[in-house]
Amino acid sequence: MKRDIFAFICCAVAVFQVTYAQILYPERFPVDKEKSNLAGRIPLYSPSRCKQNELLYPGDHADDWICDCAPGSLYYPESDACHPAFRRGPCENEQMLVLAPNATLPQCIQNACKIDGQVKINNVCYEIGHAAPCQNAHLSYVLGVDPKTLMLDCIKLSASVKSRVGLVDDDDAPLYDLSKVDLCARGCKRSIEGFCTPNAK
């Protein structure tokens, strides 16, 4: 009986010492720098802190948050603002803002459809955010901007209300799953201004 009580007390002391050490000295434990800014946090929609078409992204520390472009949006230095890709944004009438695959800065190009929010695919104008021309419309696919490539594609709408955001004030605009967003994506302000580190991508 005494031996069992002694063993129990030794185990309890050992567990208490390990727990106490972890609480007081977290820096002794190795931290994966790639995951240090994630910590289960996702970007937030915060219109009181960030500009239009921006989200509040987690930084490297618990209290470190940065406003930057929402998925599918591009930072345009001349306007110092983020604008949805393949929309007019800061461009002239009948133009749209795009980021070419190998380019660093977005540019305004002529919109063959001449209407903001429409794009021409195979000589037909389609509305961004609508099912046409997507073959899997019944599976919630719509025409939108792929947040990784920043090119037009059929993208699946996010089903989670807590972790989705639309880029424009349009009920038909694509919604992006914020739990899978690149924290320093190509075309964002930090990327264009050279503030992205290899661990932040």
Image (cartoon, rainbow, N blue to C red):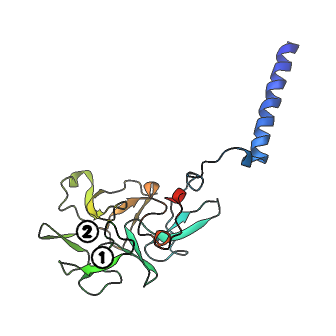
Residue at the extreme right of the image, as rendered: 2
Q: Residue at x 47, y 72 (%)?
A: 189
Residue 100 coordinates in the image, percent (x, y): 31, 70
Amino acid found under the numbered disc labelled 1: Arg
Which of discs 2 and 1 lies nearer the camera? The answer is 1
Residue 168 coordinates in the image, percent (x, y): 36, 73
Residue 3 appears in the figure: yes
Q: Residue at x 43, y 73 (%)?
A: 53
- Residue 108: image quadrant is bottom left
Residue 116 lies left or right of residue 158; in this view the side is: left
Q: Secondary structure at mark 2?
A: loop
Residue at the extreme top of the image, as rendered: 1
Q: Secondary structure at mark 1?
A: loop
Tell me the crowding category of disc 1: few under 14, some 14 to 19, or many 20 or more residues within 10 angstroms, Cα based.
many
Q: Residue at x 37, y 56 (%)?
A: 158
Tell me the crowding category of disc 2: few under 14, some 14 to 19, or many 20 or more residues within 10 angstroms, Cα based.
many
Which residue is denoted by mark 2 in the rendering? 128
Which residue is denoted by mark 1 in the rendering? 87
Between 174 and 181, the residue placed more toward the observer is: 181
Between 188 and 196, the residue placed more toward the observer is: 196
- Residue 83: image quadrant is bottom left
Residue at the extreme bottom of the image, as rendered: 92
Q: Residue at x 61, y 60 (%)?
A: 60
Amino acid found under the numbered disc labelled 2: Ile
